[in-house]
Image (cartoon, coloured by chain):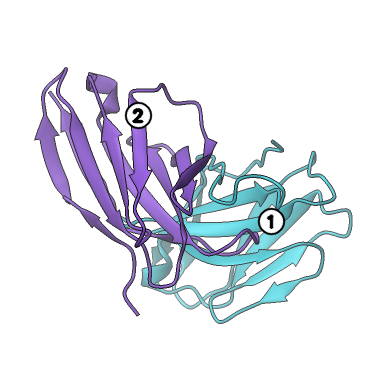
Chain colours: A purple, B cyan
Amino acid sequence: ETGVTQSPTHLIKTRGQQVTLRCSSQSGHNTVSWYQQALGQGPQFIFQYYREEENGRGNFPPRFSGLQFPNYSSELNVNALELDDSALYLCASSFGASPGELFFGEGSRLTVL
Amino acid sequence: DAKTTQPNSMESNEEEPVHLPCNHSTISGTDYIHWYRQLPSQGPEYVIHGLTSNVNNRMASLAIAEDRKSSTLILHRATLRDAAVYYCILRDPGGSQGNLIFGKGTKLSVKP
């Protein structure tokens, strides 16, 4: 069984640029959610995708967008990067609508200069 | 969403039991209590969850107060690998499934 994998693991961008982060969900999972974790803080929910549709969103501006593909993998896109976007971005996968377990990847560390 | 309160940090000795408390006085009748932990340089990892009754699994036990306003995560024998930030989270099954509201958690240190 393959776990949640994220790429890239680390990247550096400059203000105003755009970034795409990728996530492969665990085998059999059809729900993917994304979180942002600033240094020293707990993760904050960005949004969730279920069967290729966004079905939940946290308090993040529209320049944070995403996609889910038919194989349930997902992308997080961030436009017009700001210094405060520097963080660890975590992807989590799960199955169905029951309040069970989320499986997290190890994250993508984004630094914005 | 209902909130949780946890101590910022706790210390334990290796091979001793650890009791990590969590207060959630505004919990609703349908909220599940979830615990996740995050080891250094890793994503969060599910530990355990429950609704009303105490729960056990291979990692830990969850003791839930009768009024459900507090709970305790119990690690029966702490190891160095258990050093992590532990998050207590309330989850409404009617909400977005991926929407976990993390606080700052409790940073557990384990001394050899």
Which residue is at the front of the view, B82 or B47? B47
In this rendering, position of residue B45 left or right of residue B7: left
Question: Left or right of A30: which side holds B93?
Answer: right
Compared across the picture, whether A85 is left or right of B101 comes to left
Q: State which chain disc 1 sits on.
A: B
Pinpoint residue B45: horizontal percent, then vertical percent: 44, 62
Q: Is residue B71 above or below residue A33?
A: below
- Give the residue at x 52% y 58%: B36
Residue occupied by mark 1? B33
Q: Residue furthest front?
A: A70
Is residue A45 shown above or below B65? above
Q: Secondary structure at mark 2?
A: strand
Q: Residue at x 24, y 19 (%)?
A: A82
Chain of residue at mark 2 = A
Q: Can the viewer see residue A66?
A: yes
Q: Quadrant of the C terminus of chain B?
A: bottom left
The disc label shown at residue A100, or none = none
Which image quarter: residue A41? Answer: top left
Q: How many marks?
A: 2
State the residue at coordinates (58%, 62%). Answer: A96
Image quadrant where residue B81 sits: bottom left
Amino acid found under the numbered disc labelled 2: Phe
Cα gap from disc 1 to disc 2, whole angstroms: 29 Å
State the image coordinates of residue B97 (x, y, percent, origin top left): 59, 51
| Residue at the disc numbered 2 | A64
- Looking at the picture, does residue B66 appear above or below residue A90? below
